[in-house]
Amino acid sequence: MDVRQQRAPKPRPRKRVPSTPATYDSDLAQRILEAIPGGVIKVSLRGAISFANSAAVTFLGLSYDDLADLYVDDFRNKVIYENGEQCPVSEYPISKCLSTGQPQPSTTLGVQRPDGAIRWGIFTALPAHDRTGNLSGAVVTFVDITERHRAEDALRESEERYRQLVELCPDGILIHTDGTLLFVNKALAEILGAKSPDELIGTPVIDIVHPDSREIVLRRIREIETGTPATPWMELKLVRKDGSAVQIEAAARPFTLQGRNAVQVLVRDITFRKRAEHERDQLFKQVESARAHLEELSRRLVDVQEAERRRIARELHDHVGQELTALKLTLDRFGAQGASSAQAITDAQSQVNQLVNLVRQMSLDLRPIMLDDLGLLPALHWHLDRYFAMSGVRVNFKHSGVTDRRFPSEIETAAYRIVQEALTNVVRHSRAQEVIVRLWTTDKTLSVQVEDLGVGFDRDAAISAHISSGLSGMRERAALLGGRLSIESTPGSGTHLTAEFPINDHNISTDEQNSHLVG
Ligand SMILES: Nc1ncnc2c1ncn2[C@@H]1O[C@H](COP(=O)(O)OP(=O)(O)O)[C@@H](O)[C@H]1O
Ligand SMILES: [Mg+2]
């Protein structure tokens, strides 16, 4: 059955009164109703709308004429609760007022206008009585809160966005008021090693600051309190739950929270960045020192080359030159005395012999030919014999596993030069009468050792003094081939110098032990 067919014809709602001076109470009442910002609608006992003020007309988006034809029931499916659900007609404050005859408390409801837009209002309904005191209808009043509702929605949305942002933010975020932690996000709890933000909320902010950084943090808090708008990023240390320090970078910004001064702080864990920076610095230093070392090496190489050339030039001048001059004088004499001078020929022959010897010695000094042709062991034998002959220092040479063995030529050269230099040092500095030279191999290494029982020296002082290139040259030769040089020396009790080289040759065959005493 159609509800409308049951409806009796009803009077049209009264139109807005023109703005003339109020002469009667009823006029005044009506003008007040028109002037107030709230909506007022009167309905009859049957729910027919009999009056609406202009605020109500505007709120509903209908004209006076439209409203005149409507009943409360016509708003079916057009009213919603705050949670968006439909509000049944029987639950409208006006319906409840009509059915109970009682005033209805304020209820927030949304009403859909003909254009589809929802307007929100706080509705109250009061019963109306006729002169005899019988219920004659009800009056619904309401205030339009659409704008406030919209603002609240917007606020709620923005709060939700903020909450998500803060929760998802990989950086730590905290809010403190009066020095107490009011809010901490998950990331900060993690940075501080706490199980959850709840563990931290309510604690004094200074408690999470490492003692090293407390002074600067307190100063920053004071600055913010005295009106510095925002502080730039600063690096400081916080203290984790387990007491360890964590390097962070923080930026703080003051704001008002529920009428109180609050500070929001963004905290970024920079442990990894600091570590990377440190490693980069270290690497840079290493590269720098390697470069300086290389420069020093090449400078020294030039020095060594020059010294070697000077030595060869002097030898040539002093020995070869002198012998050649003597030979020239002999030949001159031979020419002046005529065809037969047996003595002059004998002299010349011996001078040529000496020259040949000299040149051979010089060439052997520069690089013993047997080092290339026969290997390390024969070259060392030859050198040790010569060393004893020239210096008078007895050499006890012990070797193992090296007979008939060849090693990479650069290792043989390095080992030979190191022994050569060590022996020169013995004769120059140690005052020892005897020296022990050892040469041996293992599966993976070739080692040489020169031991004297001489005066010894302060190794560290000698190396750091950088006075000569002998010891450092030996060290570099070993290092260049992946080996190492160790020097043990105590003033008064002699010197042990050992060089060890890695060799890749694994098929070591011989296992002979040899000892050879020179002198
Ligand atoms: N076997 C040694 N016995 C005593 N002192 C030594 C010995 N080897 C080296 N030294 C000391 O170490 C210093 C540095 O040696 P080195 O670098 O070879 O330079 P140089 O031999 O040109 O002085 C020597 O001046 C000497 O004081
Ligand atoms: Mg030396």
Image: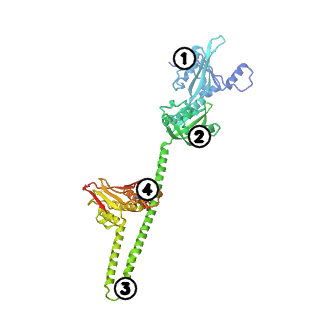
Using the image, determine if residue 163 lies above or below residue 134.
Answer: below
For the residue carrying disc 4, how many other residues have a C-alpha within 10 Å: few (<14), some (14-19), or many (20+)?
A: some
Q: Earlier in the sequence, mark 3 or mark 1?
A: 1
Nearer mark to the viewer, of 3 and 2:
3
Per the image, the residue denoted by label 3 is 333
Q: Is residue 311 visible?
A: yes
**Residue wearing tag 1:** 6
| Pointer 2 residue | 216
Quadrant of the rendered image containing residue 20: top right
Q: Nearer the viewer, residue 437 or 114?
A: 437
Identify the element where label 4 is drawn: loop
217 left or right, relative to 19:
left
Ligand number 1: quarter of image? bottom left
Q: Secondary structure at mark 1?
A: helix
Label 1 CA crowd tier, 10 Å (few <14, some 14–19, many 20+): few
Q: Position of residue 83 (x, y in %)?
A: 52, 26
Q: Earlier in the sequence, mark 4 or mark 1?
A: 1
**Between disc 2 and disc 4, whose residue precedes?**
2
Q: Mark 4 — residue?
A: 457
Q: Nearer the viewer, residue 455 or 224?
A: 455
Q: Is mark 4 within 8 Å of ligand 1?
A: yes
Q: Amino acid at mark 2?
A: Ile
Q: Which label's residue is closer to the chain start, 2 or 1? A: 1
Question: Ligand 1 near label 2 (Cβ, under 8 Å)?
Answer: no
Q: Residues within 10 Å of mark 3 (few under 14, many from 20)?
A: few
